[in-house]
Amino acid sequence: MAGPNGNLDWHVPYWNEEMSRVASEQLSNADTILLGRITYNAMAGYWPAQQASSYAAREDVAFADMMNSYEKVVFSKTLTTVSNWSNSRLANRSITLEINELKQQPGKDIIVYGSGKLTAALIRHNLVDEYHIWIHPVVIERGRALFKNLHRIVNIYPYKTKVFDTGVVLMCYKIK
């Protein structure tokens, strides 16, 4: 899911407007974003500036508006505050309690961006309902795997596939 140092530069040449529209649609179906510390720190420094940028494309500003206005729940063992990005809060309970309470609240979907350690914990605790996996036509010799150290079988079934002109494939799976 990332290069050895968490780098994502390999995906940039494959990104296009159609993918941007699909990503915006995915985000518009959510109202809560889950983030780990590293992804939170990267995004908290990026998205507020995009919303205020007079050079950003209209679609980018709309995406930034969603990113900035949605509730963001940050899972971290080292952060003590997340006050530098609006509508962010630290999870203050176990991942299972936090996610189950979020799932009980009215609203839209909950989405996770990046956050490899958080995603692994969500999988380990059986808290994932769907996977939306963007597969790029790139082989990374060494890096961070999405399903690393998974010690059980997770039965999933595809319900939607989208192939983009750049060769990227979006695979959407539900848990059986």
Image (tube, rainbow, N blue to C red):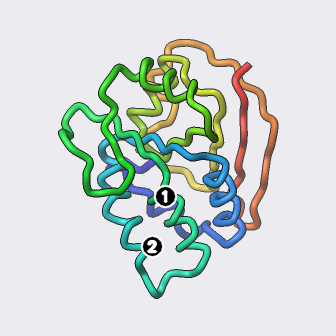
Query: Which x, y percent locates residue 112?
Result: 51, 42
Query: Which x, y percent locates residue 91?
Result: 34, 32
Q: Name the residue beneath numbered marker 1.
A: 67
Q: Quadrant of residue 75?
A: top left
Q: Is 147 situated left or right of 21 in this image?
A: left
| Residue at left offset 72%, top offset 34% | 173
Report the residue that reaches farthest toward the bottom.
Answer: 55
| Residue at left offset 49%, top offset 51% | 70
Which is more toward the observer, 36 or 136?
Answer: 36
Which is more toward the observer, 175 or 61?
Answer: 61
Q: Looking at the picture, does residue 114 appear above or below residue 125?
A: below
Q: Name the residue beneath numbered marker 2.
A: 51
Tell me the SS state at disc 1.
Answer: helix
Query: Which x, y percent locates residue 103?
Result: 57, 27
Graded by Cα atoms within 10 Å as few (under 14), some (14 to 19) or many (20 or more), the crowding at tag 2 reads many
Q: Amino acid at mark 2?
A: Gln
Report the residue that reaches farthest toward the front.
Answer: 106
Figure label count: 2
- How far separated are the C-alphas under marks 2 and 1? 9 Å
Tell me the SS state at disc 2.
Answer: helix
| Mark linked to residue 128 | none
Q: Is 84 situated left or right of 57 in this image?
A: left
Q: Amino acid at mark 1?
A: Met
Q: Looking at the picture, does residue 83 appear above or below residue 79?
A: below
Q: Is 3 situated left or right of 127 in this image?
A: left
Report the residue that reaches farthest toward the top.
Answer: 152
Q: Are marks 2 and 1 in contact (CB under 8 Å)?
A: yes
| Residue at left offset 44%, top offset 57% | 8
Query: Which x, y percent locates residue 116?
Result: 42, 38
